[in-house]
Image (cartoon, rainbow, N blue to C red):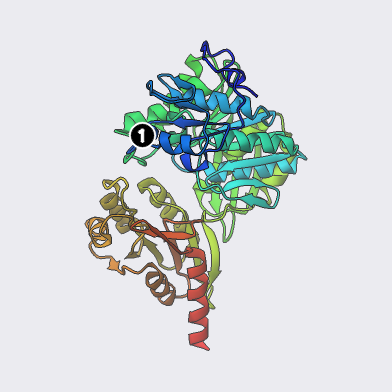
Amino acid sequence: MTLNDLLHDEGLVLDGGDLAVRGLTLDSRKAEPGFVFAALPGVTVHGRDFIPKALAAGATAILTDEPVDAPVPVIAVAEPAALLARMAARFYPRQPEHIVAITGTNGKSSTVEFLRQIWAGAGIEAACLGTLGVTRGNSVEVTGYTTPDAVALQAALDRLAGEGVTHLGMEASSHGLKQHRMDGVRVQVGAFTNLTQDHLDYHPDFADYFASKLKLFTERLPADGRAVINVDSEWGGKMAAAARERGLEVLTMGWRGSDLAIREITPRAASQSVVFAWKGREHALDIPLVGEFQILNALGAAAIALSDGVTEASVLDTLKVLTGVPGRLEKVGETAVGAPVLVDYAHTPDGLDKLLRAARPHTRGRVIVIFGCGGDRDASKRAKMGVIAANQADHIIVTDDNPRSEDPAAIRKAVLKGCPKAEEIADRAEAIRHGVAMLKAGDCLLIAGKGHETGQTVGDIVHPFDDREQGRAALAAREAANV
């Protein structure tokens, strides 16, 4: 494939356009002879600083936002990230036939996984892509990003299509949408879960955060695309209005939904009885998930599948046997007296609130929560999360959670302003052991913030750490001590 092939229909004429291209990369360390190096502007550094390194490694063309002197062809455009995405889509031309992109603050990972399970239950070759990696059947490939960079994303789509995957559910993060990583993805359906405070360390304000999410419906979906939107919040209503204004087919779901309307959710010991209506036809069933927000995610996936033509009978059959997502209200064990230990990814004020509210109906005794806040991230949410914990939990243990370059004690102090009566245990492993040790019959322990993550970032070092492993180890230690 030549450089001109990758720039087809872009209106660009280059000297040396017949140059053969072997690959694309944003990372100068991965540049090789025949590669196009994308020197993109970043949050803290600009890729142009790494052009000499990429050239030394053999890069034979440069893509960037301003003209630079180089001994190879230079493509300088105002939006190089968007052009890179389109070039990557031409370099890796295959994609699954049907792609659903889901955006929102919380619930993306669960919704794409539930959708994958529903499709698989209908005999469809399906996969999902997001925070947890690429999942197909029992196979999970960890990527480390909610929305991978444009080159990695297109390579993954091409590979999945080559493996016979016809249906893909993928997470669409605000970063990925704003940074044009998805510009080359042929999305047919866009879905929205909710919008609450998050990523304000990256977005200048909430308006920009909302506008970034909105791009899925105003820019990424084709004119004949479909939008499936949870309208239980004002933001969902705004998303639906924008999608309708563009002329998209819009289906709504949720307690206020018109197409899929939730009638009733009743918590059980390890499941929930749910009554909902699809296009006016009512259904009642038990779904083996804990927490109302999990039901919203499951029914969001159901609405997408039903709108695609999957039969009601098939969707209902899969809903009855859904398997939860790793690190999302994941039960890692229980004490000898039946007190469960649950791990969840909740790391925002809304996420923590939903988690605590979800646990309450299933708990006869105390709801005990362990959580902290990450460093180098939105500091305004720390005291807010403390207030939510103080209002919703019976006992709170504030600990460290990826302090990164910040002083961990200062982060904990900010959290404790919202919950001054909480215990403070800096060492996360010790906090988990203490929380497990204090469990009594009827209690529930929630370990919030890290979910599926397997590392604790202190400074610039990622130390191995898994809340689930720590929870199981603490339970084993408690059992051994009681023998």
Observer-nearest residue: 202 or 191? 202
Observer-nearest residue: 294 or 279? 294
Query: Where residue 86 sits in the image (x, y, percent)?
Result: 55, 23
Observer-nearest residue: 71 or 446? 71
Q: Residue at x 34, y 37 (%)?
A: 45
How packed is label 1: few (under 14 Cα within 10 Å), some, or many (20 or more)?
few
Which residue type carries mark 1?
His
Q: Which residue is mark 1?
A: 46
Left or right position of 143 against 355:
right
Kindly state the secondary structure of the residue where label 1 is placed.
loop
Count of numbered tags: 1
Q: Residue at x 51, y 64 (%)?
A: 468
Query: Where residue 323 sits in the image (x, y, percent)?
Result: 64, 53
Q: Quadrant of residue 422?
A: bottom left
Q: Residue at x 62, y 41 (%)?
A: 128
Query: Where residue 248 sits in the image (x, y, percent)?
Result: 55, 18
Q: Image height check: is 141 above or below 371?
A: above
Observer-nearest residue: 73 or 214? 73
Q: Residue at x 59, y 41 (%)?
A: 129
Left or right position of 111 against 436:
right
Query: Where residue 134 sits in the image (x, y, percent)?
Result: 61, 45
